Amino acid sequence: MGWIISTIILAVITTTLGFALFNLLKKNEILEDFIAKQSEAVKTCDQRLKQIDNKGIFYADDEIGWFFKEIKKIQEALNEFTLK
């Protein structure tokens, strides 16, 4: 009789842990997709920024050069968060 109760308790614990593991796996996959999309967005932004100033016109201009340099610094910081 005692082994039946132990078996039922073990089955309930195993089912609960399996359900929890499945939910955590789903959440992890959602976060992986989110990170991959963010990484792609950062890479696209970096490419676009380089494309905009491929001749160095904005970087060399005194009027907007400081602003462009700050944007480049922000982009460099964002580049650290891309998937490698």
Image (tube, grey):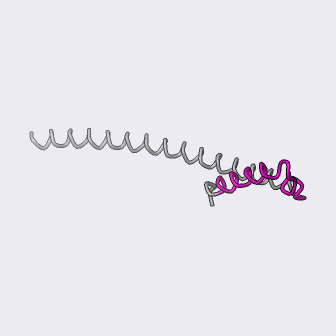
Magenta region = 54-79
Magenta stretch contains residue 58: yes
Nearer to the camera, 19 or 70: 70
Q: Quadrant of the C terminus?
A: bottom right
Among the 4 quarters of the image, the one containing residue 20: top left
Q: Looking at this rendering, what residue extends furthest in the front direction? A: 62
| Residue displayed at 68% across by 51% down | 74
Residue 17 image offset from top left, x and y in percent: 33, 43
Residue 63 image offset from top left, x and y in percent: 85, 48
Residue 69 image offset from top left, x and y in percent: 76, 54
| Residue displayed at 89% across by 55% down | 57
Left or right relative to 62: residue 81? left
Nearer to the camera, 80 or 70: 70
Magenta stretch contains residue 51: no
Nearer to the camera, 59 or 42: 59
| Residue displayed at 16% across by 42% down | 6
Residue 46 image offset from top left, x and y in percent: 75, 53
Among the 4 quarters of the image, the one containing residue 82: bottom right
| Residue displayed at 87% across by 53% down | 61
